[in-house]
Amino acid sequence: MFTELFTVIAPVFICAGIGFAWAKMDRPYDTKLVTALIANFGTPCLVFSSLIDTRLAPQEFGNMVIIAITAMVGFALVSAAVLKVAGCSKRTFLAAMTVPNTGNMGLPLCLFAFGEKGLALAIAYYTIASLTQFTFGPLAASGGAAFTKLLKIPLIYAVLLAVAAILTGFEPPRWINNTTRILGGMTIPMLLITLGFSLASLRVSGVKRCILLSVFRLVMGFAGGVLLADAFGLEGIARGVVIVESSMPVAVFAYLFAQQYDRSPEEVAGVVVISTVISFATLPALMWYVL
């Protein structure tokens, strides 16, 4: 079991560690450029190639989408109640507590733990989490949301094209498959390196409150993942994917939105950093549970 756990966790630590060390050595790293490449090319190609290669059944994909939607709604409701009782600003922390880091951490873990099938299922969950991030995030932070921005997210079109190909039995030309595999291949390592770099670069404040909110996010995520897996009768890979994705720490994008809308960005950065550090420390236990 130790060897199996190490095989899953080591690549995540190493890749994130490279990014962290790179930042600490004060080496240049254009986070905006890398993020733009991942968002516009890497992730859509990874989504398309993974769904096409695994030929995930539409029912399996649809079930995971429903579960992810249920998770986002549940996390938002529970977080809103807890933040109100705790006297914390919902505009500052609600989106951060609701949407876990299903991309930078969740996708690699599901790939290494459950293989290509696990990655394909995780992509379904990640798609809903991403859409929630780019709609609910600005809505919670600013009080309004531009839903037209959804039309500019390449991820949506990658999912639609892949699902259409699966439903119709269409086999994309080999050159398309090869191209999307190459471009998609950069996504997971760059996500992890960028995560490590970001963790080393963020400035933190309000440590005590950040620790409490970080613990809340991780406990809520794990408990919610287990409850959803039981409620939907999931077993095997699907069960593991739901629990892992739900249990992830606060996403780095939460900090970017807090910075954009001036919603205590250093406190949100604290929740991002501390929840991720705690998550790294508890990863062996989490992966032992799902494996």
Image: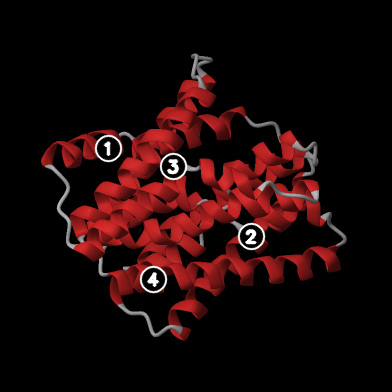
The residue sitting at 54% across, 25% down in the picture is 32
Residue 59, position as x, y percentages in the image? 32, 74
Q: Kindly identify which residue carries mark 1.
A: 185
CA neighbours of label 2 inside 10 A, class few (<14), some (14 to 19), many (20+) = many
Alpha-carbon span between mark 3 and mark 2: 23 Å
Task: Specify the quadrant that holds the C terminus.
Answer: bottom left
CA neighbours of label 3 inside 10 A, class few (<14), some (14 to 19), many (20+) = some
- Report whether residue 5 is seen: no
Q: Amino acid at mark 4?
A: Gly
Q: Kindly identify which residue carries mark 2.
A: 98
- Report whether residue 153 is seen: yes
The residue sitting at 49% across, 19% down in the picture is 29
Q: Is residue 183 left or right of residue 270?
A: left
- Mark 2 or mark 1, which has the lower sequence index? 2
- Mark 1 or mark 4, which has the lower sequence index? 4
Alpha-carbon span between mark 2 and mark 1: 28 Å
The residue sitting at 53% across, 15% down in the picture is 26
Secondary structure of the residue carrying tag 4 is helix
**Disc sitting over residue 62 in the figure:** 4
Label 3 or label 2, whichever lies nearer to me, is: 3
- Mark 3 or mark 1, which has the lower sequence index? 3
Label 3 or label 1, whichever lies nearer to me, is: 3
Identify whether 180 is placed above or below 27.
below
Q: Kindly identify which residue carries mark 3.
A: 154
